[in-house]
Image (cartoon, rainbow, N blue to C red):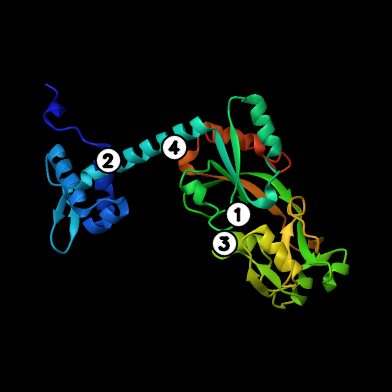
Amino acid sequence: MNESASFPAVDLGALRVFVVLAEELNFSRTANRLLLSQPRVSQIVRELERAVGGPLFLRSSRRVEPTPLGRELLAGVTPALRDIDRAVLTARSAARGLRIGFLGPFASTLDEPIAALRHSRPEMTVQLVQAPWVDSFAGLYNGELDLLLYLSPVVEPDLVTGPTVRTYPRMVAVARNHPLAARTELTVEDLGDTGVVGPPDRAPEATVRAYWPPERTPSGRPIRRIGSARTEAEMLSAVARGDGVYVTSTAMPAHFAHPAVDYLPITGLPPARAVLVWHRNNACDRVHRFASLAQDRDAGRKYSAPAR
């Protein structure tokens, strides 16, 4: 006789409620997080306990905590649910093709690898989605994006940094009536004479350190940050108004222009490296294939997918 036949079937949704309750240790917070009523959460847990054959939580007026049986179930269920989520994400990605996010200045950076992918895999669709400078990684975390073309370095939990796609020398956007506009080239020291349009609010610290100029010039003069800008249009408008200059790369003028703004090269700053990033749970063959096609062949060792 099949021993499991004497127990009711366990619903996948009930296991998700169980895992959230084990994380929150509070029925009210669990209900709010899952958009359920608190009585419904209690009912689901009771039904799951009947299906398993024993109590999963110790309940009191002050606290909720897993029983030894609950801890054992949690240890087995958590990785299984993670595997299920990964399988669903992979299937969803396969059904829709690749969705790739990019920051505005890098709009054309992926044209060649996309063309190469379409030549080798004509059945695979590719959709490009411009990512905002604020909360750029949200699409990777919620599964809306498979890949993101972003600025190196990326220091984010659960995100994998792939190959460098292209490296761009640095430039500065300057109002045409600004005193610096008469120069043919700028240095970081010149930034001590003017304000610099700052990064968007909540921009990742690693991105700010690598892409925006330092707080001081090489001689020690402060580099003042003037406000912040969330979009390329806001950045150029601030420059045109004379609020300050904007430090960018050679990728920017290829896609964004303003009648009152010029771009000048600047020395003393590292080049901007555009890299591909993806969530570790979405490291499927399509992602690795595109990463291999997109790698800048002048950037060093050829990218290869990790061994399975």
Q: Amino acid at mark 1?
A: Pro
Nearest the viewer among 186 and 97 is 97
Local packing at callout 1 (Cα closer than 10 Å; few below 14, some 14-19, many 20+) is: some
Q: Image quarter for residue 164?
A: top right
Q: Is residue 247 above or below residue 84?
A: below
Residue 140 is left or right of residue 152, and the answer is left
Nearest the viewer among 17 and 169 is 17
Q: In the drawing, what numbered circle is on residue 203?
A: 3
Which badge, 4 or 1, comes first in the chain's sequence?
Answer: 4
Residue 25 is left or right of residue 151, and the answer is left
The CA distance from mark 3 to mark 4 is 27 Å
Q: Is residue 271 above or below residue 189?
A: above
Q: Amino acid at mark 2?
A: Gly
Q: Residue at x 85, y 64 (%)?
A: 185
Q: Label 3's element?
A: loop
Q: Residue at x 66, y 73 (%)?
A: 226
Residue 296 is left or right of residue 57, and the answer is right
* Marks 3 and 4 in Cβ contact (< 8 Å): no
Q: Check the image and name the residue furthest to the front.
A: 259
Local packing at callout 4 (Cα closer than 10 Å; few below 14, some 14-19, many 20+) is: some
Which badge, 3 or 2, comes first in the chain's sequence?
Answer: 2
Q: Quick check: can you spot residue 298?
A: yes
Q: Residue at x 24, y 36 (%)?
A: 11
State the residue position of label 2. 13
Q: Amino acid at mark 3?
A: Ala
Which badge, 4 or 2, comes first in the chain's sequence?
Answer: 2
The CA distance from mark 2 to mark 1 is 38 Å
Q: Label 1's element?
A: loop
State the residue position of label 4. 89
Nearest the viewer among 57 and 94 is 94
State the residue position of label 1. 153
Q: Label 4's element?
A: helix
